Image: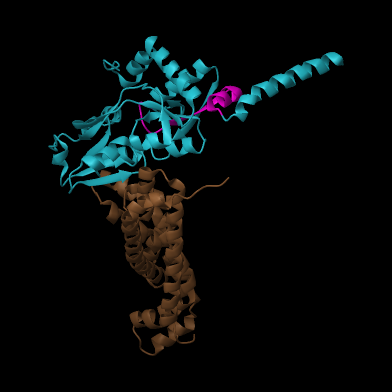
Chain colours: A brown, B cyan
Amino acid sequence: MIYHLQLGDLLPYWRVLLDGLIFTVVLTVVSTIAGVAVGTAGASARTFGPVWVGRCVVVYVELIRNTPFIVQLFFIFFGLPALGLKLSETVAAFLAMTINLGAYSTEIIRAGIEAVPKGHVEAGMSLAMSKWEVLRHVVLKQAFRKIYPALSSQIIIVMLGSAVVSQISAEDLTYAANFIQSRTFRAFEVYLVAAVIYLLLAIAMRALLRGLGRVLFRSAA
Amino acid sequence: MARYVRILSALFAAAVLASVPRARADELASIMAAKVIKVAVPQDFAPFGSVGLDMKPQGYDIDMAELIAKALGVKAELIPVTTANRIAYLQTHKADIVISSLGKTPEREKVIDFSVPYAPFYSGVFGIKDIKVDKPADLAGKTVGATRGAIEEQALTDLAPPGTTIKRFEDNNATIAAFVSGQVDLVATGNTAAAVIAERNPQRAPALKFVIKDSPCYVGFNKDEPALKAKLDDIIAKAKAEGELEKLSQKWLKAPLPPGF
């Protein structure tokens, strides 16, 4: 069965796709930075902080890792207003993605931290480095080098998972594709184009993260 | 032995004769031959289609599907669809006909065909009573929720002045959830959906601000099926003449068919 692609029908809507792509990229970049920050804080607190803080981190991580992202998103957007907290769809999308990535990266970074030999921490303390200096220069630097590939993968996964925010009317790339489909009825063409754009975006992000890794972790371990 | 051979040959011949119409790719004939009509119906749009407390589908469109199937003498297979994917289901032959409070637009007429109307329906902008909106121009600077792909959403996109924010959700349930939770104070939807929201949430009932379009419901099916169209139009006309449509209107819309329908 031969199908003739009607890509021409999509051309008048190129601006919609571009706006959606920009939204997805900005959302991913901002929530990646915030999510990794949350993960670093969480992992450090769990390993070196007081016991009760560690327990809170465990509850947070297990809650987020064991529930679907879309349910978390709907809870933030449709559920929170009942408690008086009404967030716009963009803020809700950013918040959900940050919380989600934060939980997964907490576990990833914690694995890296625990892989740093305790002897290094003791060596740092014996050189009169403060706890924070040991954490930053001895532990985290080594931890990140070890888990960087796993963290990059998780970032790409969260970027691809961002497609779900279209469900709360956040105007990302998937929202743009759905919108164009509802006007042109060219489902095959528009979702093919959207999939290709996501693919190129993922490849570009992987290359970018790999380059960043090379710059950050230049010296041999 | 010979008797059995004769009976089997007669059955075989009947089966061959019954299957011949299918070779001509005539939708109506293949429905009659299969003895099943696949009807795409909504499950998120009371009172046209929703799920009852016993988890069974119920609504105006479901009753209409059963009516048509009975008139054809076949079984109805109900296929749940959303506003966004119902036309795609028809185009890919996942459904034979669409009965989903479907309105007629020139864009849709390019890709599918319609029967005569079977149910009355108007869409408009509804909202909480504290907001003052009487005509489209009043929407400037306000936020309106709508279901992507629905007739009122497309009409609203054309009618709304610049400065209006339109939030499009993927299905009616999300749009209703957005209104009920307070994420939007105005929604573009149908009169019947608004009535359902009002019934379930009297403290935040949507009041009509202005009518966007009076748009009755049609049965949708694929293009180039004259036999199917003729048969469906015939069934609907008979149902109207015999008072069946009036009964459905009273049962589900709690209102009589409008004059001149």
Residue A103 found in image quarter:
bottom left
| Residue extending furthest toward the top | B242
Asked whether A154 falls inside the magenta stretch, the response is: no
Query: Can you give x and y, in whole percent of width and height, for residue A143 in the image?
Result: 45, 76
Quarter of the figure with the N terminus of chain B: top right
Query: Can you give x and y, in whole percent of width and height, for residue A76 in the image?
Result: 32, 50
Query: Can you give x and y, in whole percent of width and height, for residue A68 in the image?
Result: 44, 51
In the image, residue B239 above or below residue A3: above
In the image, residue A80 above or below residue B55: below
Query: Can you give x and y, in whole percent of width and height, for residue A190 in the image?
Result: 42, 51
Q: Residue at x 15, y 34 (%)?
A: B129
Residue B168 found in image quarter:
top left
Q: Residue at x 42, y 60 (%)?
A: A197
Q: Residue at x 70, y 19 (%)?
A: B14
Q: In screen coordinates, is A101 left or right of B162?
A: right
Asked whether B29 falls inside the magenta stretch, the response is: yes
Q: Which residues are magenta?
A: B26-48
Q: In screen coordinates, is A29 left or right of B164?
A: right
Q: Camera-side residue: B155 or A76?
A: B155
- The answer, for residue B91, to whether it is visible in the render is yes
Quarter of the figure with the C terminus of chain B: top left
Residue B145 found in image quarter:
top left
Q: Camera-side residue: A77 or B222?
A: B222
- The answer, for residue B59, to whether it is visible in the render is no
